[in-house]
Image: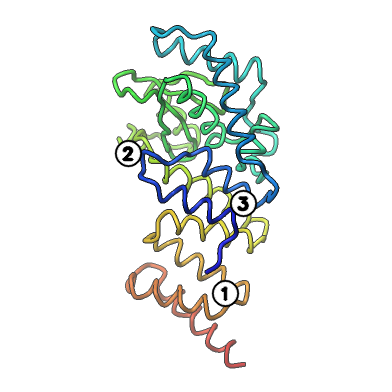
Amino acid sequence: MKFSLARQAFLHEIRQPEAEIDVAKAALYIAQEEFPSLDVDRYLIQLDIWAAEVGKTLLPESYPLKTIKHINKYLYDELGYRGNQADYYDPRNSFLNQVIDRRTGIPITLAVVYLEIARRVNFPMVGIGMPGHFLIRPEFEDVGIFVDVFHQGEILFEQDCLELLRKMYQQPLPSLPPEFLAPVTSKQLLARMLTNLKVIYIQRNDLTKALGSVERILLLFPDALGELRDRGIIHTQLGNFSAATLDLETYLEQVPYGTDTAKIRQLLAEIRQKSEE
């Protein structure tokens, strides 16, 4: 398959060892498929400049809460970053260049900005892929604090995270499963960004762009069978019957007794019928 230059660059970046993946650069390559003239280096330099401004106010011995306070002040008070509550599902919220230009976004893209600033001032932080709401926290596990980048860098503790989930799901959750607060890898973070785009595009019936999102998720995680199935379904809807058949048959070989097996077999039968017409 011949990839666009942006996708080639994305693939090259994610093939680096996990610890060496530049998340901001990979996120900008995602955006570059939507904005082909995007200058990746310009946005990376912008992050460098902002981090340098934050660094001017930090002392080497600054403790975590003080460092977070300084980053918050600069990002939210001086630069005016905000969570986009008015138009949460605008796809621009998932493109890092647009988040940097417009200074608004959704939790995961705002998190990328925050993580990149923190990394550049030698205050490593990690992403926390809590269901429904992406958070970040200092890399040091014993600190016990989380940062809600969507809500002006609000400091949360574990009990706050639990209450947040209770409000979101309207259920009396007794406790937080440990995996809800586990750090995500760079690839997991990028896949979550792409999943957001995939869902938005499916809802907008923009299947070509949804397909592009799924394809890049599969570059990150080639064994993601649910994405393989979804790619087959999207290919079906786009009329790409040969590609759809290959994906769906491969999916059934790997998941012969899944809850969706009967539906996938029926879809394959419909594809064969259409192909014969």
Residue at the image position 58 percent from the left and 33 percent from the top: 44
Q: Position of residue 80 (x, y in %)?
A: 67, 21
Q: Amino acid at mark 1?
A: Thr
Q: Which residue is mark 1?
A: 236
Residue depicted at x 32% and y 72%: 257
The numbered dot on residue 131 is none
> Which comes sooner in the sequence, label 1 or label 3?
3
User: Circle 3 sits on which residue?
Assistant: 200
Q: Quadrant of residue 7?
A: bottom right
Q: Amino acid at mark 3?
A: Ile
Residue 259 vs 273, above or below: the answer is above
Q: Residues within 10 Å of mark 3 (few under 14, many from 20)?
A: some
From the viewer's perspective, is residue 254 above or below residue 15? below
Reading the image, the residue beneath label 2 is 179
**Amino acid carrying mark 2 in the image:** Glu
Q: Residue at x 60, y 22 (%)?
A: 49
Spot occupied by residue 224 in the image (x, y as percentages of width and height)? 39, 59
Real-space Cα separation, disc 1 to disc 3, in angstroms: 19 Å
Q: Do the residues under discs 3 and 2 have CB atoms within 8 angstroms?
A: no
Measured as percent of width and height from the top left, residue 25 is found at: 53, 40
Q: Say which of 20 and 190 sits in front.
A: 20
First in sequence: mark 2 vs mark 1? 2
Q: Alpha carbon of mark 2 to alpha carbon of mark 1: how far?
A: 35 Å
